[in-house]
Image (spheres, rainbow, N blue to C red):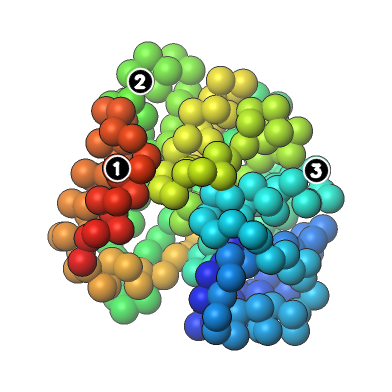
Amino acid sequence: MPTYNEETCIGALLDSLDKLEPKPYEVIVVDGGSDDNTTALAQRQNVHLIRSSKRGRAAQMHCGALEANGDILCFLHADTFAPKNLVQIVEETLSDNRIKLAGFRSIMTGTCHQRMTTWHNRIKTYYAPFIYNPYRTIFKGLRLLFGDQLLFCRKTDYLSSGGFNPEMMILEEADLCIKMNRIGRIRQIKTKVYSSDRRVAKWGVIKSNIIFVAITSLWALGVSNKRLARFYGNVR
């Protein structure tokens, strides 16, 4: 779990992970230098807290993956809540050796039920890879999964693919999907996870989804990660 100033979310999330049945082998929080109470709240829980020297979700998640002792990795954002039977679902999904990476259906919640954004999150898993590479999408099972979908995979597959690129500041999950699809299939399962709509609420539904379409499409058309990160960071 990558964190940076997540004191409003992390307590409730860690409490929910403690109630999973069966329980996960370990919970790793990789903090990117929070100056609020994030790390203090994490230390109160039975988690492995790592302080990353490099900030950024890709760098932090890669750091956590390398430190993990388990055979299966789950990449969870601090504002996304997993189903109680997460461990069982993950194990059953990865019992199919053809599947190298998988993720859930993300439901946006918070200020209101974000039906449009939830629907868009579901379909961009399919249209974005088609723009990027129609052949791999149709014949090789390429899908693009994103952070609020709670990605999971075997650690051996993660390492053999190359894993997250620590230098990327945006769309690091899409990059991972491309790598993992070279060694197997990617699957979006029907089970739901629930993610905060805080960014959508800040920007508004229409503006948010236009931005998401623009970012994903520009990435698929080959715009550099640095330019995309600057564009995303300048959005107000």
The residue depicted at 74 percent of the width and 46 percent of the height is 66
Which sits in the foreground, 34 or 19?
34
Where residue 128 sits: x, y (%)? Answer: 32, 34
Picture quadrant of residue 132: top left
Q: Amino acid at mark 2?
A: Asn
State the CA–CA distance, disc 3 to disc 1.
Answer: 35 Å
The residue depicted at 46 percent of the width and 26 percent of the height is 142
Picture quadrant of residue 127: top left
Name the residue tied to disc 2. Answer: 133
Q: Considering the numbered disc 1 on the image, is that residue within a helix, a strand or a loop?
A: helix
Which sits in the foreground, 132 or 223?
223
State the CA–CA distance, disc 1 to disc 2.
Answer: 21 Å
Task: Kindly report which numbered mark, 3 or 1, lies closer to the viewer in this rendering.
Answer: 1
Q: Which label's residue is closer to the chain start, 2 or 3?
A: 3
Q: Considering the numbered disc 3 on the image, is that residue within a helix, a strand or a loop?
A: loop
Q: Is residue 182 above or below residue 12?
A: above
Q: Amino acid at mark 1?
A: Arg
Name the side, left or right, on which 178 lies relative to 128: right
Label 2, residues with CA under 10 Å away: few <14, some 14-19, many ≥20? some
Which sits in the foreground, 132 or 152?
132
Which image quarter holds the C terminus?
A: bottom left
Task: Kindly report which numbered mark, 1 or 2, lies closer to the viewer in this rendering.
Answer: 1
Q: Is residue 110 above or below residue 189?
A: below
